[in-house]
Amino acid sequence: MDDAPAPILHMRGICKEFPGVRALSDVDFRLLPGEVHALMGENGAGKSTLIKVLTGVHAVDGGEITLDGAPVSFSGPLAAQQAGISTVYQEVNLCPNLSVAENILIGREPRRFGRIHWKEVRRRAAAVLERLEIHVDVSAPLSSCSLAVQQMVAIARAVDVSARVLILDEPTSSLDAGEVAQLFRVMRRLKAEGIAILFVSHFLDQIYEIADRMTILRDGRLVGEYLTGELGQVELVGKMIGKELKDLESLENAPKDIAAAERSRPFAEARSLGRPGAVEPFTLTIHEGEVVGLAGLLGSGRTEVARLLFGADHATTGELSVGGAPVTLRTPRAATNHGIAFCSENRRAEGLIPDLTVRENIILALQAARGWARPIPRRTQDELVAKYIDALKIRPADPDRPVKNLSGGNQQKVLLARWLIVEPKLLILDEPTRGIDVGAKAEIQRLVVELSDGGMAVLFISAELEEVLRLSHKVGVLRDRRLVAELPNDDDLTTGVLMETIASGGRA
Amino acid sequence: MSSDVLTAGRSAALRDRQRYLPVLVTAGLLVAMFTVGGLRYEAFASGQIVLNVFIDNAFLLVLAVGMTFVILTGGIDLSVGAVVALSTMVTATLMTDHGWSPLAVVPLVLLIGSVLGLAMGCMIHYFEIQPFIVTLAGMFLARGLCYVIGTDSIPITEETYTAVAQTQISLPGEMHLSVSVVIALAVVLFAAYMLHYTRLGRNVYAIGGSEQSALLMGLPVARTKIAVYTISGFCSALGGVLFSLYTLSGYGLNALGMELDAIAAVVIGGTLLTGGSGYLLGTVLGVLVLGLIQTIISFEGTLSPWWTKIFIGLLLFVFILLQRLITARRS
């Protein structure tokens, strides 16, 4: 490895302390020109902190950062950007109301005679996108583009600002397979041009597809730097979580009694339930103690199905019966009264209230169910919260900490705890494991299995087919806003079959 | 390949139509109102009627231009009506009671308005206070200052000033314009140029789209936001000067609620109150719609002027609903 070119970016002995927490201690990181370098670690391992220290969001407490051999220290993302370090976040930070071209060039628009030279703006934007082999109409408003294209536009902007170091923080979380492939094509091009890319993703397969090298962090410490080819997936996960993968494997082999689930009483039955523009009429039965998985690409109607079942959207056709009796769910509140709980995909916007504490967030749904006139006694609150913090291993185990200070995985657990506490009969989980680390993922998966063993019906929505397959008794496949197939999870069902069904629409 | 190009062209046309739809609706409304007026009343369908709408609303047009900048960033400026009143008061008292020359008074008034706007912009940006509250405070301040100057109406008799106010610029076809209209139209053209062809203008749109993103994209958010309120302050002061040209007096109760007329004109002109979307042309059309409603009601003769407010209210409801539908379809 000593014959490698000199690193463009070198961080040595980086330490960062927050009140009460040592976020980073003595971390080394180096980035070579023309490589894709994955930064790996569980949530809370220090990945985000390292990126924030690098881009000047946080000041360093100890250690040294050099860019091209010269020590640097940035006052903020802007200064970092000017020095050639650009960051593209999962949430696209662009202006949806402006055109694609403007988003790439705003602030640096070419001018002629003191006024913006619009023709040149479009020409230059098109040239930048052309370089990345992205074909979009540059005068279209950004809001008309897909999320993937928006992300590419963000990257195009970063590259055009003359980035030498590009940080991609979880860019693939919201993309489907085709879009990820497109992103990777762009990344490879940039790499060939000598740009160093720091890549963060929770999808191990993606890491192995794109990364040349990886640096693993655990608990704010450096575990090591490895060539991707020299470290197997199992070893990688072991190093990330610092323990063996027995937990995951035991789940893998858990036999599923499909017949038993089918024999138990149906809890929710949707007959030709549908809503124009959201999802075509579908028929689906969820039995007590059954885990029904929903698979499909992003935007295939998975979330829409969940929202109809939860009453967040109104069904215009078909009928729904819960516990044998037909019901019309006009509001989420009505659904809650029928014992249905919904953990939304978008935990920041629709689920948690970031400024409330862990305890307040957990108690919220139960309190709402009781009505505001009957407050839950503090002692009961404490007991319940302590029980779920313990059961779900929420870290840090401090009920009075604002939820916004928790890592993504732990936020997800808080949201889960909120709904578990009301003891629902049907739990709808929309992407509960997205963007969270392997350890927390395994815990949530085990929890789903335990809950269904206890008689709870679960609707499990996930983009990860392996996960759907591992947990579900049967899998509904969605494509183009239509439920195209309902497959029992017997020995014949594999991710391959699922993928084919998604691809063919169940017609093959 | 050729079919791809075709569909791309068609979708681009569709997109443009959607983008300009609010402005087109307002333009259509204006044409409809003018047609109805022309059919109902004799002597309505003449060019001078349109010009009179401009003459009677030149000050509102200038206010609405400043308001467009503010609303495009997603803000609001409630102080404009009070600043108009203050400007008329300062103009009248300095010229009538103290014998100042208009050449000194007008720049001073414009400076006062701009500085007030600048101060409000700084408070809004640096202390992260809601524009609603800051400009509400600015409104009370300006309105209160009027009464410090005087509680009665002060007539303006200064010769040059009255001469300018009474100047009629003749146009072919026996039509005429006032100096105020020329100034207002110059402001509109200059502002439209700024919004479309300068970085400041584009930054205004960017901030309205997403302030957070604008910040992360390295745009000068602070400078732009403060500039926007300064522009609005300047426009209010200029509107006040035009208003004093129109009434040839200064009075603390002038322009009561005119900030709301300006906001209404901007909204009817198709600018989204949430910011980031809208055109100055729409604002001009919005002002014309408001003016034409007044004209129609005065032609009707028997209707109380309060019907103006009722129609404006109804129109606002319709246009807000329209905005909602358009944004809903976009997302």
Image (cartoon, rainbow, N blue to C red):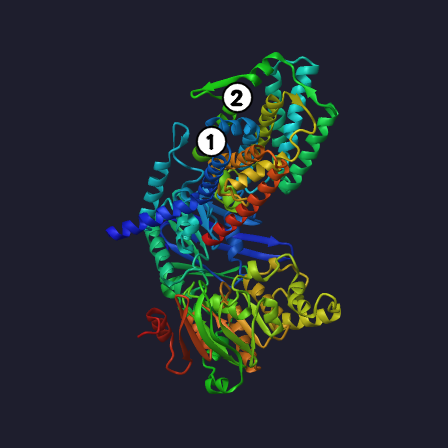
Which chain is disc 1 placed on?
B
Task: Give the Cα distance between marks 1 and 2.
Answer: 20 Å
Image quarter of residue A413: bottom right
Other-residue count near label 2 (Cα within 10 Å), few / some / many at <14 / 14–19 / ≥20: many
N-terminal label among 1 and 2: 1
What numbered label is drawn on residue A465?
none
- Give coordinates of residue B102: x percent, y percent: 61, 15
Amino acid type, residue under disc 1 in the picture: Ala
Q: Tell me the element at label 1.
A: loop
Q: Which residue is mark 1?
A: B45
Q: Which residue is mark 2?
A: B178
Asked whether B83 or A454 is in front, the reply is B83
Q: Residue at x 37, y 34 (%)?
A: A117
Amino acid type, residue under disc 2 in the picture: Ser
Name the front one of labels 1 and 2: 1
Q: Quadrant of the C terminus of chain A?
A: bottom left
- Give coordinates of residue A213: x percent, y percent: 39, 59
- Give coordinates of residue A233: x percent, y percent: 41, 69
Asked whether B297 or B207 is in front, the reply is B297
Q: State left or right for residue A455 relative to residue B17.
A: right
Q: Tell me how many marks there are.
A: 2
Q: Tell me the element at label 2.
A: strand
Residue A446 visible within the image = no
Q: Quadrant of the N terminus of chain A?
A: bottom left
Asked whether B194 or A167 is in front, the reply is B194
Which chain is disc 2 placed on?
B
